[in-house]
Amino acid sequence: MIDKCFICGEDNEHVLQQHHIVPRWLDGSDRDENLVRLCANCHQAIEKIYTRQVFLRLESKFTDRVTQLVADFVDKHITHTDRETRTRTRDVYDQFVEYCRQRDSRPIDRPSFHREFRTLTTSTVTIKENSTKTRKYYTDLRIER
Ligand SMILES: [Zn+2]
């Protein structure tokens, strides 16, 4: 890691501090890609801007993206196939991971996936209530749960 402030270039090592880009309380890692060297002044300034509230806002944007990813997956791989909906939810997750791999998207963990999946499939059913295919899908899902 370069031993100067990433923002202002201050190189006095006595004032240099390690800053987590994604904070630890949001599961930000201690790995190099999540760390940046800042002087005390810049560190303080940045912490003032990126408050907990701001990060929660940013996280909600990420959550929307996650929902979209699972929604795309459901659209492409679930509602259009009758047989596959009978697979156990564990297999659905494996299928989702494969789907993410093909799209170069980072898959979310299993519990998050199931949470999104259930929310989405339930709301999909509400929206497409008149579709026979969707109703069948919903029936299959109830068996899985
Ligand atoms: Zn600085």
Image (cartoon, rainbow, N blue to C red):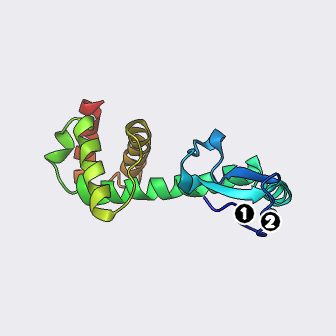
Instruction: Specify the quadrant of the image occupied by residue 71.
Output: bottom left
The residues bearing labels 2 and 1 have C-alpha atoms spaced at a distance of 5 Å
Label 2 sits on residue:
10
Can residue 123 be seen from the camera position used here? yes
Q: Position of residue 134 (x, y in %)?
A: 27, 51
**Residue at the outermost bottom position:** 8
Q: Earlier in the sequence, mark 2 or mark 1?
A: 1
Front residue of 17 and 101: 17
Category of crowding for the residue at label 2, using alpha-carbon neighbours closer than 10 angstroms: few (below 14), some (14–19), many (at least 20): some
Label 1 sits on residue:
4
User: In this rendering, would 97 be left or right of 66?
Assistant: left
Q: Is mark 2 within 8 Å of ligand 1?
A: yes
Quarter of the C terminus within the rendering: top left
User: In this rendering, would 74 be left or right of 16?
Assistant: left
Q: Amino acid at mark 2?
A: Glu
Q: Position of residue 39 (x, y in %)?
A: 80, 58
Front residue of 64 and 20: 20
Front residue of 100 and 2: 2
Q: Are marks 2 and 1 in contact (CB under 8 Å)?
A: yes
Which residue is rendered at x = 57% and y = 41% of the image?
27
